[in-house]
Amino acid sequence: MQGPNPPLTALLIQLDSIADISVREKAAIAALPLRAQVFVDGQQIFREGSSQSEVCVVLAGMACRHTMLSDGRRSIMSLHMAGDLPNLQSLHVGRLDFGLSALTRCRVAFIIISKLRDVMLLHASASEALRRHAAIDSAMSLRRIASVGRHTAIERVAYLICETFKRAEAVGIAGLSAFELPLTQAQIGEATGLSGVHVNRTMQELRRRRMIHSDGMTHAILDWGMLKQTAGFDSGYLNLRPHEHDAAARRM
Amino acid sequence: MQGPNPPLTALLIQLDSIADISVREKAAIAALPLRAQVFVDGQQIFREGSSQSEVCVVLAGMACRHTMLSDGRRSIMSLHMAGDLPNLQSLHVGRLDFGLSALTRCRVAFIIISKLRDVMLLHASASEALRRHAAIDSAMSLRRIASVGRHTAIERVAYLICETFKRAEAVGIAGLSAFELPLTQAQIGEATGLSGVHVNRTMQELRRRRMIHSDGMTHAILDWGMLKQTAGFDSGYLNLRPHEHDAAARRM
DNA sequence: CGACAATTTGATCTGTCTCAACTATGGTGG
DNA sequence: CCACCATAGTTGAGACAGATCAAATTGTCG
């Protein structure tokens, strides 16, 4: 039914990295009926306040959750890349209080919620993996509150780079030490709570300090240690494993 | 087994307000074996990076999720009051990337995760209610990212007041238009990303504009309309109901 | 080549921070 | 009962990170 590189590969990679999930259960997920759709960059996938009957999976490209502020400006609350499920919440809540938009040309698959629920009922560990996925999304939000709330400009931008790089790496779409951050500096500003102009100066500073090297929207990590120290970044929360009591052993 | 005002009342009120849940299922939750414990204000309930085998329910008082920044300062990522489940994540992930501390003298109940899981397996709609609770927690985090990232000082403080008031109201611990926000101004700063000094001036401004009146840590809402407008606050995300397709009808 | 978007640079302005002092307020022990 | 102390709130002055505005430059794509 699926070709050699089925559409949900990235999702399965993500689930694999956070949970023990059998081949059979992965097959059940991969066999879910999909409605694939391409969005051009800037295009809205769904509106803030909308009610979704489908859960969407990003297959390729980058999307973001965002909300409009009273003064008309936009806040980008999270970034989403291949394998992400930006509205998994729709399993449990009606209206979504954020909009979802494509930042780049984006391939997205839609899964009817009731079909997903059926699979989750039948496959306990797939179900558990999805819940863990949601919990990690939630952990990312909490981290971002701390980063955006209390960090300086350079820390915030460094943080965004660290997190996005690590996530891209996890789904295999980052190079050895370079990756795509396909946002304009103005968009990076919307995601970090800074003005576009200041993002520009901040990234210059990161380059001047030889932590990164940028070529367009491709960024090479020159000094990961320094970058993560600057960001106050610890990847621990990204690849949380199942609840075990030897968690200490896994600590980096 | 329970007295006239069983410990989990506030939790049941919360679940009731977000989901349809039968008396039988509520009884199953209320019958969960609890380990109750009192924490004095400032006391840590669990440490950042710890692994929890119990989920805790706030019974009374106020607690907060927090994390330490590299420079030693603290960021408060969320506030928790009666009926909240600040570490429901522990159902799915090992290490928690935040600490939990009592802001006031706090009564907290601990539920062994495996026991909670048993109840969830047996009672589908209780289980669904808890998941919706987690989804709303997640929605609050997203909102806070937008508020802390892009809002001015007065908007952030107003937002915190709006949200805390509405939540307190929902569990019946707020007066008609007054409620307890038991944080020092310095703590409000940690929660909003402002300095304590500036929180002071900001709250003076809110009082000067006659939106609130403060008596110690009790705050009266004088002009709710103005306050929520200032905050850019819309309570929609707090009492999200089950997924229905008539969601529009419920829109405020 | 021309047009449009994104990046870069410079200059100025402002919201918020920091530091420091002073004033409640409430609790504690003598 | 009061002197003392610690903690929270308040006020002022000055400094600074980052915003805003405006213009120049670079890059990209038809």
Image (cartoon, coloured by chain):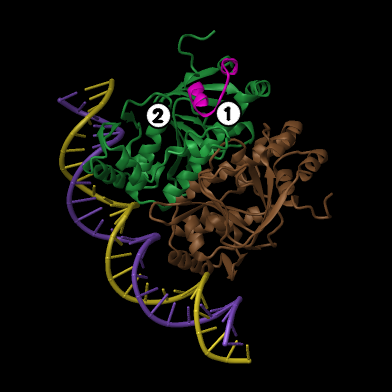
Chain colours: A green, B brown, C purple, D yellow
**Helix or strand or loop: what does disc 2 sit on?**
helix
Q: Nearer the viewer, residue A28 or A199?
A: A28
Residue B38 picture location, percent across and down: 67, 58
Residue A69 showing in the rendered view: no
Say whether residue A116 is magenta. Answer: no
Residue at horizontal 33 percent and vertical 29 percent from the top: A179
Q: Are marks 2 and 1 on the same chain?
A: yes
Residue type of the residue flagged with mark 2 = Ala
Is B37 on the left or on the right of A102, as rendered? right
Relative to residue B71, is residue A251 depicted above or below? above
Residue C24 picture location, percent across and down: 54, 80
Magenta region = A11-28
Relative to residue D30, is residue A44 depicted above or below? below
Residue at horizontal 84 percent and vertical 49 percent from the top: B1
**Helix or strand or loop: what does disc 1 sit on?**
helix
Residue D26 picture location, percent across and down: 18, 34
Tell me the subunit letter for badge 2: A
How far is disc 2 from disc 1 in space, using C-alphas?
19 Å
Image quarter hosting the N terminus of chain A = top right
Residue B214 picture location, percent across and down: 58, 69
Q: Which mark is residue B11?
A: none
Say whether residue A15 is magenta. Answer: yes
Residue A219 showing in the rendered view: yes
Is B4 on the left or on the right of A77, as rendered? right
Task: Determine the main secondary structure of the stretch shown in magenta.
Answer: helix
Residue at horizontal 62 percent and vertical 25 percent from the top: A125
Residue type of the residue flagged with mark 1 = Leu
What residue is disc 2 on? A168
Residue at horizontal 52 percent and vertical 29 percent from the top: A18
What residue is disc 1 on? A130
